[in-house]
Image: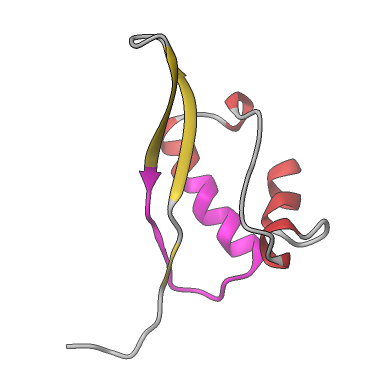
C-alpha cells in the first residue's frame, strides 16, 4: 500500500577507462533513492555510499551535475562535499 512517503531518485553515471576494451566507457553505477530531504549533504552521502561500494574517491578526476545550487553550491552543495 502506498504510504505517501516521497523518495527522490538520483541516477549516478560514471565514465571510466576499461582496459579490457581499451577505451573510456560510460555506465550506470546505480539509481539510489533518497528518502530524506534533498540537501547537498544528504545527496553527497547517498553518492558517497555508491562510490565506496565500487571504487575510491581518489580515483575520481571530475564531478558533473545539473546547475542547481544544491548540486554545485560552493558551501553546502554536493560539489563542496565532493571537494572536501
In the rendering, at what x and y percent does residue 32 appear? Answer: 39, 57
- Give the residue displayed 37% in from the left and 42% down from the top: 28
- Give the residue displayed 65% in from the left and 61% down from the top: 41
Q: Quadrant of the N terminus?
A: bottom left
Callout count: 0
Which segment did they paint magenta? Answer: 29-49
In the rendering, at what x and y percent does residue 56 appear? Answer: 54, 29
In the rendering, at what x and y percent does residue 77 appear? Answer: 72, 60
Quadrant position of residue 2? bottom left
Membership of 37 in magenta stretch:
yes
The reply, left or right, for residue 50 in relation to residue 66 is left
Membership of 30 in magenta stretch:
yes
Farthest-out residue, left: 1
Q: Between residues 81 and 27, which one lies in front from this camera angle?
A: 27
The reply, left or right, for residue 56 in relation to residue 63 is left
Farthest-out residue, right: 75
Q: Quadrant of the C terminus?
A: top right
In the rendering, at what x and y percent does residue 79 appear? Answer: 71, 50
Quadrant position of residue 54? top left
The reply, left or right, for residue 29 in relation to residue 75 is left
When the figure is inspected, residue 72 is found, relative to residue 15, above or below; the finding is below
- Give the residue displayed 62% in from the left and 57% down from the top: 66
Amino acid at each position: 500500500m502506498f504510504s505517501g512517503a516521497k523518495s527522490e531518485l538520483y541516477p549516478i553515471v560514471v565514465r571510466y577507462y576499461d582496459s579490457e576494451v581499451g577505451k573510456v566507457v560510460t555506465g550506470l553505477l546505480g539509481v539510489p533513492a533518497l528518502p530524506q530531504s534533498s540537501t547537498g549533504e544528504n545527496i553527497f552521502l547517498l553518492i558517497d555510499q555508491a562510490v565506496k561500494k565500487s571504487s575510491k574517491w581518489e580515483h575520481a578526476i571530475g564531478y558533473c551535475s545539473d546547475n542547481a545550487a544544491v548540486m554545485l553550491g560552493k558551501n553546502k552543495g554536493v560539489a563542496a562535499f565532493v571537494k572536501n
